[in-house]
Image (spheres, grey):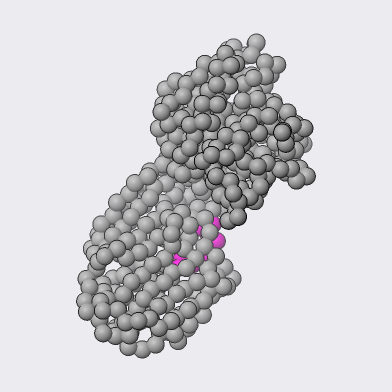
Amino acid sequence: MSILGNCVPQRVFFYFERLCAIPHGSGNCGEISKYCQAVAKDLGLWVKRDELNNVIIKKPASEGYEAHEPVILQGHLDMVCEKDADCPIDFTADGLDLFLEGDWIGAKGTTLGGDDGIAVAMALAILEDDTLPHPPLEVVFTTDEETGMYGAEALDASVLEGKILLNADSECEGILTVSCAGGARTEIRLPLTAEDNAAPCYRVVFAGLQGGHSGVEINRGRHNADVLMGKFLRTLPEACRVVTIFGGTKDNAIPARAECVIASQEDLTNLAEAFVSTHRDEANAGLTAIVTAESTASTCFDGESTRRIGEFLATVPNGVQAMSKHIDGLVETSLNLGQLTCEGNELKATFALRTSVNEEKMKLAKKLEETAAAFGGVCTSHGFYPAWEYKEDSRLRDTMVRVYEEKYGKSPVVEAIHAGLECGFFCDKIQGLDAVSFGPDMRDIHTPRERLSISSTARTYDYLCEILKQL
Ligand SMILES: [Zn+2]
């Protein structure tokens, strides 16, 4: 039974519904990749599928467009798999249970994968339509974007001739994204010295902070719970000792909660409460301290280690490091201490680094290395991904702005984001690439409340076809 049969553009929603019937969470893109390959073969088009399940499909120019520059149309095949606790769907075996709700499409109890299935559906509809005027097309479907952009990273771009890329992985109609951050993951390990302990122990928890996305929300004045814990440790009496410390589970989320077990002769309740009251402000109104007595631990870290943990957390670079000189209000370089834990006699701190200027990334990694060394620790970085730097002259951007204005009588918003997009990898692989990211309205992506707007998809598809006609 077709749920989307009456949605227009019909062929876009036909393909979208087919894609939703194929399990395609990150790491499980084999079937959806084969499906796209089969569609291309049926259409008699050139197609290549690689071992990471990336798919490249080429369609020759329509009549009269043979001399135009080839255009790359790109989206990712994988989706985030999130579901409600009581939802029976098995993401590795079942299709999604689609439903309509006014102008919106959703999937019962699960994410919908409009991010980024709608890009794939739009591209397939364009590939099969022989009435559309367009330059030579190179359609690229990547895999495992959501878990680290692994498909885009490994893609062999040497078969691509285009230097213009339309990435359809944005979720807000009327916004054209023209630059994004690159980044890396950095881990610092500090060796600590243990000693015997006989003092009573207290668990100090700082909670109620807002947390948030380590890129998009890094400049909102929200306290990092781990940094706050470090500052608290600095205020403690000499005789106090850290037993263990923990805060945050993802390097790309600002920790909203941190906890530390502290050996101390005196009850720490008043100290902790006084400390948080001086750190509560508008952005951190919910901050609370919870102090509970713990059973005594037989070992703790010595005084020198305890002081070093506090100094390190309170002074390590964290948060916004530089704002963009080109784009108002855009964070250019930042880092987030997202995970903090003790492993044996080591403190382990993990950071997400982001910057829209590629050379700043190495400088920031170096700064962390120096900080680690100053505290007697070691620093390692991995998972580097390139920034998509702002391009002063962009024919694609100019065309997309002009077409938008002609169609809707208003200007689109042109913006840069302090988060990652696959465009960074394509810019890295294709010299002089001119790229823009766009897409139809979606709500609550990456959650079971994800919705895709039908009317916005229709307008976005129409807009895309017009852009292709004018390139
Ligand atoms: Zn996406």
Image point (48%, 78%), residue name: 289
137 and 93: which is toward the camera: 93
Placement of 357 over or under 56, stated as above or below: below
Query: Would residue 183 be seen by someone viewing this image from the given angle?
Result: yes
Percent from the top left, x then y, of residue 13?
69, 32
Image point (29%, 85%), residue name: 199
Q: Does 405 sit left or right of 356 as displayed?
A: right
Percent from the top left, x then y, of residue 140?
52, 27
Q: For residue 172: magenta?
A: no
Q: Does 202 sit left or right of 436 as displayed?
A: left
Q: For residue 223: magenta?
A: yes
Image point (32%, 82%), residue name: 296
* Corner quadrant of residue 155: top left
Q: Please report the bounds of the magenta region as a residue range.
A: 217-225
* Corner quadrant of residue 266: bottom left
Placement of 300 over or under 470, stated as above or below: below
Placement of 79 over or under 130, stated as above or below: below
The quadrant the C terminus occupies is top right
The quadrant the N terminus occupies is top right
Q: How many marks?
A: 0
Q: Does 227 sit left or right of 17 as displayed?
A: left
Percent from the top left, x then y, of residue 247?
42, 65
Placement of 324 over or under 168, stated as above or below: below
Image point (35%, 60%), residue name: 349
Instruction: Examine the residues drawn in magenta and state their main secondary structure.
Output: loop
Query: Would residue 431 be seen by someone viewing this image from the given angle?
Result: no
420 and 93: which is toward the camera: 93
* Corner quadrant of residue 64: top right
